[in-house]
Amino acid sequence: MGWWYTFMTRGIGVPLFRGVLRTTVIGAETVPPAGPAIIAFNHFGGVDILVIPALLPRPVAIAAKAELFEARGVKRLLSWWLRSMGQVPMDRQGGGAALAGLTPMARILQAGGVVGIAPEGTRSPDGRIYRGHTGVARLALATGAPVYPIGTRNTRIRRRLFWPTLRDASFVVGPPLDFSPWRGQADDPAVWRWATDAVMTALQAINGLPYLDVYATRVKKGEITGAALEAYVRPHPGGGTAPPPTDAELAAARAADVPPTGVEAPPEARP
């Protein structure tokens, strides 16, 4: 990333967020000084994607919705701004488009850089945590990069005595999640979902907020409201699903010609 990114994050962002808005990121030193890393954060306020790059010690390429990069006319300035700040377009529609949208971020990771993604895909509509999309898991499984969860809370700018502040906001970096033992299963949707739920569980553990097992975009579109929404409340993501067998466990099972733990033998192999 170039001089503009450095100027905006270090020259303006650091004084603004630390000095004026009184923002802190706890555990920023957890992110290593070198090597690929994925920052996964739950998303409450529009300021999240500005604070994280400014207050982490390394440049972070944040994934932003692809529609922001497709503006025309005067709004094309927004596209230029996002790209100059290292943000990367990401399709939120799912399927092949979303998978192709991960390629720029995978390249950054393969070059030893840092990318940031909000797994929920949009801001929380009510301050709770919602079901995560699988982009973070796909990147981690495909590249072997560790995932650093950042639990956020109260990140909408408030006023205190007519002065804007983020003093009550919480940005906490948790211990890294290593999915490299499952890297050989990078094309398995069941492994994507398990790893995604593991990331969302880590975020919930950091900020202690309620979890709803439904995509936030459905709620924001008005597809689910009121009492119907409360039916999706869960104690935590994943429902206690056990981790799938690692690559090493699968290899050992194949070598021994027996099914791995948790996998039932086919009928013809049963005694």
Image: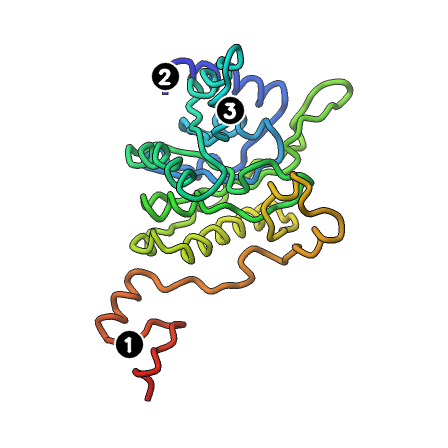
Q: Residue furthest top?
A: 74
Residue placed under numbered mark 2 in the picture: 2
Q: How far across and how far down the image is residue 119, in percent?
A: 51, 42
Q: How is the image coloured?
A: rainbow
Q: Secondary structure at mark 3?
A: helix
Classify mark 2: residues with Cα within 10 Å, few (<14), some (14-19) or many (20+): few
Dot 2: element: loop
What's the amino acid at mark 3? Leu
Residue 121, percent across and down? 53, 39
Q: Quadrant of the N terminus?
A: top left
- What residue is shown at x 27% (from left), y 71% (from top)? 253
Reply above or below: 122 against 176: above
Crowding around mark 1 (Cα neighbors within 10 Å: few <14, some 14 to 19, many 20+) is some
Q: Which residue is mark 3?
A: 68
Image vertical order of residue 163 relative to residue 208, above or below: above
Direction right: furthest residue: 161
CB-based contact (under 8 Å), mark 2 and mark 1: no
Give the Cα separation between the discs numbered 3 and 2: 21 Å
Q: Nearer the viewer, mark 2 or mark 1?
A: 1
10 Å crowding of disc 3: few (<14), some (14-19), many (20+): some
Residue for point 63% across, 57% down: 234
The image's mark for residue 123 is none
Q: Please name the amino acid that badge 1 sits on.
A: Val
User: x, y percentage for residue 177?
Assistant: 42, 49
| Viewer-side residue, 261 vs 165 | 261
Quadrant of the rendered image containing residue 84:
top left
Residue behind mark 1: 258
**Disc 2 from disc 1: Cα separation:** 54 Å
Q: Label 2 sits on what residue type?
A: Gly
